[in-house]
Amino acid sequence: MRTGRTVPRAGLLGLAVLALVGGAVPAVAEPVPVTVSATPIDHFALSDPSRTRFGVLDFRGGLVLTPSDSRFSSLSGLVLGSDGRAMLAVSDFGLWVAGTITEDARGRPTGLDDVVVAAMLGPDGKPLGKRRGDAEAIVRLSRDAVLVSLEGTSLARFAGDPPFDARAAFVPRPPNLVRLPRNLGIEALAAAPAGSPLAGRIVAFGERAGADGLHPGAMLDDGRWRPIALVGHDNFAVTDAAFLPGGDLLVLERRYDRPLGLYMRLRRIGVDDLRGSAPVDGPILTEADFGDEIDNMEGLAVHVTPAGETLLTFVSDDNRSIFQRTLILRFALSTPMPRARPQTGG
């Protein structure tokens, strides 16, 4: 991954040496304001600045975020306000990261203002940190409550908007996902929006496909988890998911091939497939690699503009590595979307 235009692609080696550059994250006793500088990303394809369409996505713009405080790092999931501006993210280190995405008149991100970092609190009122595993995914349950996956150990509900003072209330995990390895646990959470066919349902997926080629998952339906499975392709890992307004599910995936191969993929799973019992699969909407402005893309959120456009916002996890970057990328979903199954190897 690149930290900027001056760092060569050899920076992708960063994923292999994270342990050498990580270091401890300072404790957060109370919410801390953080200044974040933003460098615009004007084009997504490094080799073709004129290109704006990527699969069925139209690139709207992006940002490279450079904070004044190392506690702004390792963002692994996010939710947005209805206007796509108010952002609440979770960090691997058990931290909340909140801010406001600013935009220009054309809807392109221009900066991240009013940034605050705060500790997630356990039931005892003490910072969670990594006691229960990395915080990997977040989903909004209601206006003033969110659910967070603490990878491999817990699901935690937090009340409040923002939830800085809330204490974690641990809730039962899907029975079929309890035995996932600590570092390969629930990596993706998504909640179907009001008015959609699956309104009120929550979907969870594990990061890696098993020996059967399926990513283990579950759907919370009428208070009970039922198993579902996602067909894996090409050794991609699941990193997040988000529902579209109509009920289809977008799944964000990542693959890293040492030393220089970094890939991002987005798939769509049909709402009718999610209602069934067979493993779910769906078409690829877009793919990107190290020739594009990506990093370790781990968070995805969807919102609809007053004009009716569906916008997708991605965030990357820099792993607190000097070789990686924290990115915000924004795309508009074009129509029509493909309906065919992907023609890729398993």
Image: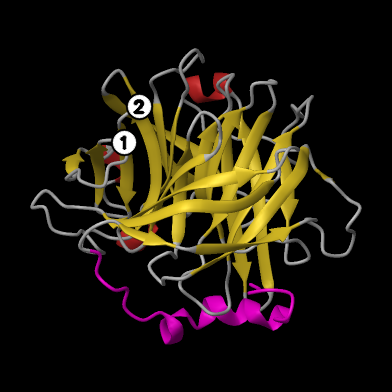
Residue in front for this viewpoint, 170 or 255: 170
Element at label 2: loop
What is the three-letter code of the residue carrying label 1? Asp
Residue type, mark 2 in image: Arg
Residue 4 magenta-drawn?
yes
Residue at the disc numbered 2: 143
User: Looking at the image, which residue is at 24% across and 63% down?
Assistant: 129
- Residue 338 image point, x, y percent: 77, 29
Marks 1 & 2, CB-CB < 8 Å contact: yes
Q: Looking at the rendering, in which quadrant would you find the N terminus? A: bottom right
Towards the viewer: 122 or 268: 122
Q: Which residue is mark 1?
A: 161
Spot occupied by residue 344 in the image (x, y as percentages of width and height): 73, 48
Q: Residues within 10 Å of mark 2 (few under 14, many from 20)?
A: few
- Magenta span: 1-28
Q: Residue at x 84, y 46 (%)?
A: 52
Where 157 sits versus 4, above or below? above
Q: Is residue 181 visible?
A: no
Q: Is residue 236 above or below residue 199?
A: below
Which residue is the extreme one toward the bottom?
Answer: 20
The residues tagged by marks 1 and 2 sit, at their Cα atoms, a distance apart of 7 Å
Q: Residue at x 48, y 46 (%)?
A: 215
Q: Is residue 269 visible?
A: yes
Q: Residue at x 32, y 44 (%)?
A: 148
Q: Quadrant of residue 141?
A: top left
Q: Secondary structure at mark 1?
A: loop
Q: Position of residue 69 (x, y in %)?
A: 41, 70
Q: Position of residue 65 (x, y in %)?
A: 57, 63
